[in-house]
Amino acid sequence: MAVATRRPAPGKNVLALDFALRKERSLWGDAWRRLVRNKAAVLGMVMIVFFAALAVFAPLIAPHGPLEIYSNNAFRAPAWVHIAGDAAHTGDPSFLLGTDSLGRDVLSRLIYGTRTSMVVGLVPLIPTLLIGITVGMAAGYIGGRVDNLLMRFTDVVYAFPGLLFFVIMMTALRDTSFGKLLNGLFLLFISLSLVAWVSVARLVRGQVLSLKEKEFVEAARMIGASDWCIMLRHLLPNSLGPIIVASAFMIPGSIMTEAILGFLGLGLRPPTNPRAPFPTSWGSICLEGYAAINAQPWLLLAPAICIALIMLAFTFVGDGLRDALDPRMIE
Amino acid sequence: MIKYLIRRFLWLVPVFFTVALVTFVLMHAAPGGPWDTDPMMRKVDPRTEAVLNRRYGLDKPLWQQFLDYVWNAAQGKLGPSYRLRGRQVEDVLRERFPTTAKLGLLALAMAIVVGLPLGVIAALRQNTWVDYFSLFFATVGTAVPSFVLGIFLIIIFASWLHWVTVLESDWSSFKPWILPAVVLGVGTAAYIARLSRSSMLEVIRQDYVRTARAKGLSERAIILQHMLQNALIPVVTILGPALANLITGSFIIETLFRVPGMGRLYVTAINQRDYSMIMGTTLFYAVIIALTNLGVDITYGFLDPRIKASE
Amino acid sequence: MFTRKNWTIVATLIMVVTLILPACQAAPASEPVEVTRVVYKEGTPEVITEVVTATPEPTPEPGKEKVLRIHLNSSPDLIDPQQSSFNNEIAHLSLIYQGLTAFDENLETIPAAAESWEYNEDATEITFHLREGLKYSDGTPVTADRFEYALKRAADPRVAGEYQYIVFDIEGAEEFGTANVEELSDEELDALRDAMQVKALDAKTLWMKLTHPAPYWHTVMGLWVAYPARKEMIEAGGDLWWQNPEYQVGNGPFILESFEEQVKCVLRANPNYWAGRPKVDKIEFHFIPDTAVAFEAYKNDELDIAILAAEDLATIMADPVLSKEAMVEPGTVTMAVMFHNLRPPFDNKLVREAFTYAFDREGWCNDILHGLGTPTLQWIPPGVVGYDPSIDMYDYDVEKARAKLKEAGYNDPQDLGEIVITYPSSPRNQTRFEWLANMWQQNLGVTIALDPVEPTTFTALTKDVNTTPLVYILGWIQDYPDPQNWLSVYWTCGAFGERIGYCNEEFDSLCSLADAELDPEKRVELYQEAQRVLIGDCPGAFAYNRANSYLVKPWVKDIGYTPMDAAWPGQWASQTTVDIDLSMLP
């Protein structure tokens, strides 16, 4: 929405001057302002930035290496717990959250685990959105038999019980060479995308269906705009709102899936190289903690709290985005 | 309407076929067979392995195994289980499914009983502490992993408070079902709370509510007669898929609480390459999901004539 | 009122209710059953049909009943003497049935259903003499033809029991067992079955002929595969006969009372057991896969015996009460680090020796197993005949390790390339193998890569010499307590040792001599000599004996532990003697 560039004569009309000098206001700006006003969403964004920082700067923040084994240090309690007479298990400030069964620092492993969770949340979005938007656009815009075919295809994917599909995929393909890339993360990304694109496609299709008949599309067609032009410059930007919101909710879903798969023993593979970028994940730590719950309950509690926090963060932001991008909400 | 139903049912056939094909291919892509589990507990001599493979038809070419399976499955015969020797998969499923279904239903009931009032009241008292509490509960309920919640509840209620025993085994009574249903249903309860809250909020702003108030109806009458019915529609439409979700996603809870259901069967079957059990359970789950999706679409069809017209 | 919305709600409710209904149906009441029994009257078999009713037994007063509640870590899929091969299944079988022979606390073979036996001159034939007056728990006499049926059923390809190979030493068994069921008719298969050389000469005498001299055969006949299953019960009971107390009727010290899949199994004492009624009134097996949950139940006094997990060992040992209830004893399992003898660099014996010298068994058992394993330098475990305490070959010595590596021509250990260790992935294993990699990297300066695979994949890989991993840890749980099972069955050419490419003629000839040797002392000497040859070849690093670890409540008395007790302590030697002191119950 552009502002008129003609300036009135100076000194004549204060209101006109004010109008001319006002900054451009777009719908996106409005949305951002609404988002920032939502306290929970801001809190969520702060938490996400915090976790992202942990993930990126892990080597600088973590007190120990994630794979560093300290002998005779297994199942040490967190620093604030004092067990009288048991020097090997009493809290030690250098191991803030205690140690695991090999004597590795839980806090450091948690910090490095943040990387896996952030990556698992964000990376699968790319193929998901690419495939989902393409299919949804095609189905909604072209319609007819193409639409029918694509929708039946999504039916097949929908019919697959979600978590169970992941379990089968991971079990079946983990030991192939392709399943070993990036310690098994690559396979996880593919599996997550294969299932998630369906909801994006349906969403986009719905949007396109309702937008297709609107006047501005008809107008664009009359001018002679090509189909591609219509799809990319008109339909896509107007569908972005729901897509963004859906993405924001997909991220915690992926993180939880990784945690559950890790808990079932089907997640990340442990590397031996101490400089490997993804040494561990919260799901794997949960699994270790689960078996050791009587020896060191914080081994399970700590990653569980982290998972909960990051899911809360993304959910708050998602809620905020939905409220912010919903044109029907009266301010 | 009938034509629509028939068409949807017919489409289910290729859907199930594809599900079966994908499962079959993935299962056989994994190295190792049903006789390869845990060398420390069971050793199968290679001669015996040949006998076993012959007996179960595992020595036939893969495409033939698949076609045989599909042919039998269409008649409801899902094959013999390789681990539960001597039992047919369909018998095992028939035995175990009611337990899982019961768990799912209890979880759903709990989710409705807790989530619905919470969401409605939160909407009515928007931005008060009730609202914030229900939002908090809703988000936490979906954020904590179920296995974590489960083990901590066991420790609290069994070991510390002794309200239940750790080894509940009398599944015909009521007590053993409480904890697993709660843990399973928490996520759904949170989801229902949010959904009913947002739908109630929308209804509150509608014009007809203002009209009713202008007419002078009591607040109570307004809520009960007008708002609730409309607010509940979105919730009712998700009940089917929610139930399907609970039933197909219960295996962690079942393992933790030793519920004798079919979810647990599934994960064990995958680890042990019990091919027929994997195929049978996947198809069964796919049927449940497909039927509930169909139910939802039909419900939408009833409620929204525009969708019917566009089909 | 009848708006569309209400119909939807009603429809949903109807859908929902129809799903509940099956679950709410009451279980059908059990009815009396007609069973056909074969009864011997003066030596002639007579078939009678009668209605089976439960023998009324005096019910002990509530609160005064001795119930032993035992934790098993998985629910048995099938309790059938000729088809079972898992520990938890065997735990049930050894209570419900009794075999020809049994084992005492020292793992010596003692008479059980058979009161005596003798071999012919070259130990290719054996004759068992059954005790007088043996009965199943329903009163039917136990006769020799029952055991004949059991052994033939074990080999029957139509039954396809996974453990059938154990009876292949009986002449005719292998031909029968591996016969192609698709191609042969029932009559032809029956003919093969009858050609199997095991016969009941009369009601109390059982004779069998073996394919080679086997003076240890009486030990093998103590295994569950030879338990006298009831033909008429199995045929009448359908697919689930083994869960049903009407049909799973044995001759052992306990009677199957009830079986709830995935939950528990209850067995009550057999008052008519020939060796005397067991001291406890009931044994309950609780199936709990999660050790954390089982531990909670044990602490809550809901279990009397629980499996002790490695993760909880530290907590338990730190607790003054629990530490006294922990029972950690060596088991009949030996684990070794296997090297692929045919693939470089491990085709070079010096390299194998280097890695073996560099293996810190003590550290492994203390830091990794937390005491749930004992280091060993040989294959046969302590407690089994043939174990040689004097062996000290290849004990931990880092200097020697490095020297051997140089001797092999690797002045720079990095020249070995990346050594890949493969293992079944599980959280426990992950940490263990990281430690192992670390140890070798530090001691030898080599580079180790870890390759965790799915457990089922791992088993598949280790079965064929072409797919066997370069380095992995595997072990052997014995079938029966005899050095023949440890040495000849495993390491002779073409047997399990072939999977890593091990084959030594000298070892084979020593084993065949020992297998046929009738004099028990000479036998042991020959086996020990063979074992020394085996260790000297250094096919792998013999590492540790896995321990059986349990938590046992103080009121459980008179457990006679044997190293074979993999399911619960006392399972093989104390079924009738284990007792509960009711005065000590909380």
Image (tube, coloured by chain):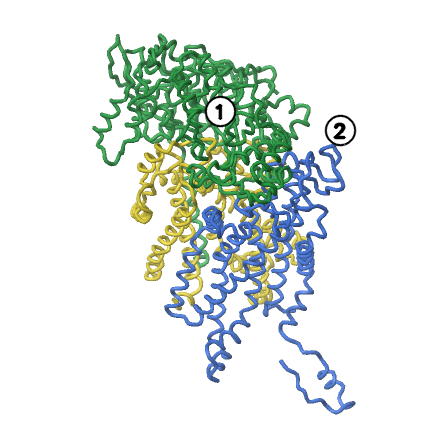
Chain colours: A blue, B yellow, C green
Comparing C212 with A165, the one in front is C212
The residue wearing badge 1 is: C533
**Quadrant of the frame with the N terminus of chain B:** bottom left
Please tell me whether mark 1 sits on a helix, a strand or a loop. helix
Residue C506, picture quadrant: top left
In this orientation, does residue B229 appear?
yes
Q: Is residue B221 visible?
A: no
Establish if B58 lies above or below B205: above
Q: Nearer the viewer, residue C319 or A275?
A: A275
When the figure is inspected, residue B175 is found, relative to residue C118, above or below; the finding is below
Which sits in the foreground, C272 or C491? C491
Quadrant containing the C terminus of chain B is: bottom left
- Looking at numbered disc 1 in the image, what kind of residue is underneath it? Val
Three-letter code for the amino acid on which mark 2 is drawn:
Gly
Image location of residue A78, percent across then percent down: 72, 39
Using the numbered discs, state the Cα–Cα distance from disc 1 to disc 2 in whole angstroms. 49 Å
Q: Please report the residue visible at 43 percent of the width from the left and 10 percent of the height from the top.
A: C275
**Residue corresponding to mark 2:** A85
Chain letter of mark 1 equals C
Instruction: Tell me which residue sits at (52%, 17%) in the image.
Output: C65
Q: Is residue B163 left or right of residue C165?
A: right
Sort mark 2 into few (<14), some (14-19) or many (20+) by Cα contacts within 10 Å: few
Q: Chain of mark 2?
A: A
> How many other residues sit within 10 Å of disc 1, few (<14), some (14-19) or many (≥20)?
some
Marker count (numbered): 2
Q: Nearer the observer, disc 1 or disc 2? A: 1
Q: Is residue C381 left or right of residue A40?
A: left
Q: Position of residue C441 (x, y in %)?
A: 62, 40
The spot of residue B95 in percent (x, y) is 40, 37
